[in-house]
Every structure is written in C-alpha cells, then in structure tokens.
C-alpha cells in the first residue's frame, strides 16, 4: 500500500538532487525507504539529507538538473511498510475509524478526522448522538492505542478538560 510522503518543490543544484517537502513527522522517517513512486514511476532512493525542515533526495536515474526539473511539483509516494514510525506514532489513515473509549469503558465515539496543526493533532470524533467532539491529542490524554483492533482509550478526566463540542449550526 502506498502513502503520500511529500511533494517535490524544486531541483537542488546541478547533479539531480531534489528538494522535498516531507509530509512525514520528520525527515528521518525517510531513512527506511528504498524506493519511491512519482507520477506512476518507481525510483530507487539513493540518498536523503535533512536541511532546514526539508528533505534533499537523490533518485536513481535523475543525474542532472534538467531531469530533476521535470519532477518539480509532483507528489511522492512510498510503500507504507517501508516507513518506520517512532513509538506511539501512527498513520492518520490508521487512526480514522478507531472507536474511542474512556478508561472507565464509556464509549465516546468514532474518529472521523484529524487536523494537523504542528503542536498537537486535533481529533474529531462523532459521538453516538451525532455531535462532533474535538480534542488535541496530547500525551496526558492517551491511555492506550490499539490500531489493529481500531480502539483508543483516553483519560476521561483529561478529556473533559481539553475537549470541545463543535457547533453544528
């Protein structure tokens, strides 16, 4: 399964290096990736370096600026299984659809969206009565996450402090 990992911003230098806006949590997450797909074509990922929050990558077969320029503005995909996430980090697509419960066992609802703001992801959960509850995903909130069983357990006291119901008007 492929996952979007970034977008090529421009050619960098004259030897075919590309500046990539990396959509993963950090550039280091690219280290386990051996091949990427751009415009339906697979490329071997030869090297990755970090530079001011961007990734600079070299691809097999892209050896000069002219070849690199042809890839400008294209999205870059990688096999999800090649991406090594740090502990307690998850792919957004794996969290969507998870059922949320308090540590007391009360069913809160199902995760339907995640907004990414940098300091904390904000989860939107549709409750059994059809309302939307939003809360920032902070360390103090997490009790347990079981992606395989699509279940998230949160600290009910902390949830009450940080959650808000969205106005449905």
Image (tube, rainbow, N blue to C red):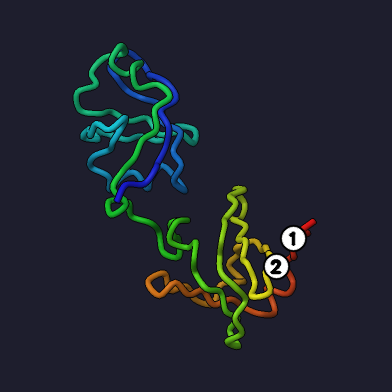
Crowding near pointer 1: few (<14 within 10 Å), some, many (20+)? Answer: few
Q: Is residue 59 above or below residue 141?
A: above
Write down the residue under mark 2: 131
* Residue 1 position within the rendered picture, expressed as x and y whole percent measured from the top left: 29, 51
Q: Secondary structure at mark 1?
A: loop
Q: Nearer the viewer, residue 121 or 168?
A: 168
Write down the residue under mark 1: 166
Q: Which numbered disc, 1 or 2, marks the residue closer to the eye?
A: 2
- In the rendered structure, the answer to whether residue 108 lies left or right of residue 49 reads right
The residue positioned 57% from the left and 57% from the top of the image is 113
Distance between mark 1 and mark 2 Cα atoms: 7 Å
Figure quadrant of residue 89: bottom left
C-beta proximity under 8 Å, tags 1 and 2: yes
Crowding near pointer 2: few (<14 within 10 Å), some, many (20+)? Answer: some
Q: Secondary structure at mark 2?
A: loop
The residue positioned 43% from the left and 24% from the top of the image is 73
Q: Nearer the viewer, residue 50 or 99?
A: 99
Figure quadrant of residue 162: bottom right
């Amino acid at each position: 399964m492929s996952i979007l990992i970034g977008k090529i911003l421009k050619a960098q230098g004259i030897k075919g290096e590309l500046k990539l806006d990396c959509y993963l949590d950090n550039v280091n997450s690219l280290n386990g990736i051996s091949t990427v797909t751009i415009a339906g074509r697979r490329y071997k990922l030869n090297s990755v370096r970090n530079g001011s929050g961007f990734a600079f990558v070299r691809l097999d077969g892209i050896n000069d600026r002219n070849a690199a320029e042809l890839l400008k503005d294209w999205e870059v995909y990688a096999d999800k299984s090649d991406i090594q996430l740090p502990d307690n980090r998850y792919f957004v697509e794996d969290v969507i659809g998870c059922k949320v419960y308090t540590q007391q066992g009360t069913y809160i609802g199902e995760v339907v969206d995640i907004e990414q703001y940098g300091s904390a992801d904000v989860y939107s959960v549709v409750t059994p009565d059809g309302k939307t509850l939003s809360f920032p995903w902070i360390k103090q909130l997490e009790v347990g996450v079981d992606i395989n069983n699509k279940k998230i357990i949160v600290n009910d006291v902390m949830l009450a402090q940080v959650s808000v119901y969205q106005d449905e008007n």
